[in-house]
Image: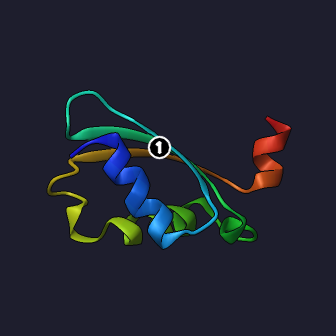
């Protein structure tokens, strides 16, 4: 598993999102996902949306994924 593949999976499930994924060991990753789809949703719901794009890979091929999920407005505020 590599960061580019994870980014592509997330983009398939959340079209139009800005996704940055990093991770050097092939099983532990960090991701920043910025999407309009997160508007009005609590952090847990946002994380579930991202996990849904990865399906059964979570907990398997992807041992851990640290997420930061923001709307475009939140990302612009820094």
| Image side of residue 56 versus residue 69, left or right | left
Q: Nearer the viewer, residue 47 or 6?
A: 6
> In the figure, 63 relative to 17: above or below?
above
* Relative vertical location of residue 23 with respect to residue 59 in this rendering, above or below: above
* Residue 56, quarter of picture: bottom left
Image height check: is 24 above or below 1?
A: above
Residue 27 placed where, x, y %? 20, 41
25 horizontally vs 21: left or right: left
Please give the residue where the numbered disc 1 appears in the rendered image. 31
Q: Position of residue 2 (x, y in %)?
A: 27, 42
The residue nearer to you, when weighing 7 against 70, is 7
Circle 1 sits in a helix, a strand or a loop, which is it?
A: strand
Q: Residue at x 35, y 52 (%)?
A: 6
Q: Report the quarter where the C terminus lies.
A: top right
Residue 1, given in percent of the width and then of the height, sits at 20, 46
Q: Nearer the viewer, residue 56 or 8?
A: 8
Tell me if mark 1 has few (under 14), some (14-19) or many (20+) residues whose alpha carbon lies within 10 angstroms of its own: many
Q: Residue at x 25, y 60 (%)?
A: 58
Task: Tell me the residue at 29%/71% (across/down).
Answer: 55
How does the figure colour the protein chain or chains?
Answer: rainbow
């Amino acid at each position: 598993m590599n960061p580019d593949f994870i980014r592509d999976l997330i983009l398939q499930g959340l079209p139009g999102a800005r996704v940055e994924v990093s991770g050097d060991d092939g099983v532990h990753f960090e991701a920043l996902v910025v999407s309009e789809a997160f508007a009005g949703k609590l952090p847990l719901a946002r994380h579930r949306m991202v996990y849904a794009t990865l399906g059964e890979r979570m907990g398997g091929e992807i041992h851990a994924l640290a997420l930061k999920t923001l709307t475009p407005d939140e990302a612009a505020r820094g």
